[in-house]
Amino acid sequence: MSKLKNKEFDINEEQIFGIGVSVPGIYKEYKDLVINSTTHYLGSINLKTELNKIFNYAPIYIDNDANLSVYYEWSHMLDKEYDNLIYIYVVDGIGSGIIVNNSLYTGSHGNAGEIGHMKVKSKGKKCICGGQGCLETISSIKAIEDDFKKAVDNGEYTLLNDIFDSPFDYKEIITGYLNNDKLCKKIINRAIKYFVRGLSSIINIFDPQIIVLGGLFDEFNEDMIKKINNKLENSYFPDENDKPKIINRGDQQNYQISAVTSFIFDKWKANF
C-alpha cells in the first residue's frame, strides 16, 4: 500500500508525476527567486526550495503565468495550428508569452515577454520597475482602478454611484463602459489607446500570425476586438494579409490551472 505523504488532502505520492507553479513575474531558476512581480512578497522567497520541503516526491516546475498560458493556447486550445503566437495577459501587471517557430521563446535570460515595462508615455506614472510611463501604469487592471478612483475622488461623476457601492473594481468599470458611462468610457478608452500603442510595437517586432488576449479582455465583448483592430489600422503593414488575427483566450473555468496542467503533462510525456 502506498504511503500517503499528505493526509489532509489524501495525496498518494506515487500518483504525482509533476507539480507546476504559475507566477506573476520572471522566475530566475539559478537564484530560485521571482523578480519584477506585482506580488511583491515572492521576491523574498526561494520558492522551489521551500516547496521541495513539502512536496519532495515529484519534480517542481515554476514559470511565468503568461508563458504557461501561451503554451496552453498554442498546444491545446489552438491545436498547434499557428507557428508564431503571442498571448497577452492584462491583470495587475501586463505580461506576454511568445511562441516562435513552434517553440516557447523566453529570451537569453528568461526576460522575454515583459511588455508591461515598455515605455509608451514620455511623462507617465512611476512603475514598480523604477521607470516611468510603462504600459502597465496605464493599461493594467490596477491602473484602470487607480485612475477611476482618483477621478471619482476629484469629483468626476459616474453612473456607477447609482448602481454599485464604492470602491469600484474593474468589472464594474467595464460594466459602466458597456453602458456608455462617460467616466468609464474615458478611463477605458485611455487605457486601450496606450495598449494599442504597445501592441503595435509588439506586432512590428515579432510579426505573429495570431494574438490571444486574456485577463482584462475576458470581460469585454467582440466589439473591443473590433475597436483594437480599427486602431491598429494606423500601424504599418506591408500587406493587408500581414495583419495578425486577434482573439480572446479560450473561455474556460480554472484557466490557469488548465494551463499549468497541460504544461506539466507535456513535460512528463517528454521524459516518459
Image (cartoon, grey):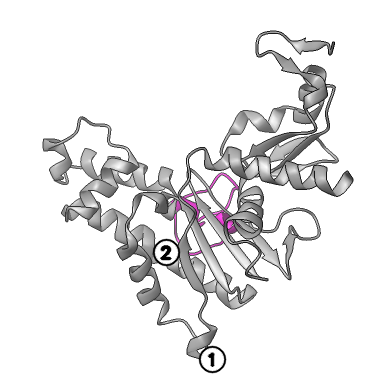
- Residue furthest toward the right? 271
Q: For marks 1 and 2, give the one nearer the viewer.
A: 1
Residue type of the residue flagged with mark 1: Pro
Q: Residue at x 54, y 57 (%)?
A: 88
Please name whichever residue, 159 or 19, is drawn nearer the observer in this view of the structure: 19
Task: Indicate the quadrant containing the N terminus: top left, top right, bottom left or bottom right.
Answer: top right
The mark that comes first in sequence, 1 or 2, is: 2
- Residue furthest toward the left? 162
- The span shown in magenta is 114-137
Give the left or right position of residue 110, taking residue 148 as reference: right
Query: Residue 11: percent from the left, percent from the top?
Result: 72, 17
**Mark 1 Cα shell of 10 Å, populated few (<14), some (14-19), many (≥20):** few
Give the left or right position of residue 219, taking residue 17 as reference: left
**Residue 127 vertical position relative to residue 253 in the rendered view, above or below:** below
Tally of numbered discs: 2
Task: Indicate the quadrant containing the C terminus: top left, top right, bottom left or bottom right.
Answer: top right
Magenta span contains residue 123? yes
Residue type of the residue flagged with mark 2: Tyr
Give the left or right position of residue 265, taking residue 272 as reference: left
**Residue 17 vertical position relative to residue 118 in the rendered view, above or below:** above
Which residue bears the numbered disc 1?
Answer: 238
Q: Is residue 262 visible?
A: yes
**Residue 250 vertical position relative to residue 60 in the rendered view, above or below:** below
Q: Residue at x 54, y 62 (%)?
A: 119
Magenta span contains residue 165? no
Tell me, for residue 262, which label it has, or none. Answer: none
Query: Residue 224: percent from the left, percent from the top?
Result: 34, 63
Tell me, for residue 194, which label it has, or none. Answer: 2
Magenta stretch secondary structure, dominant = loop
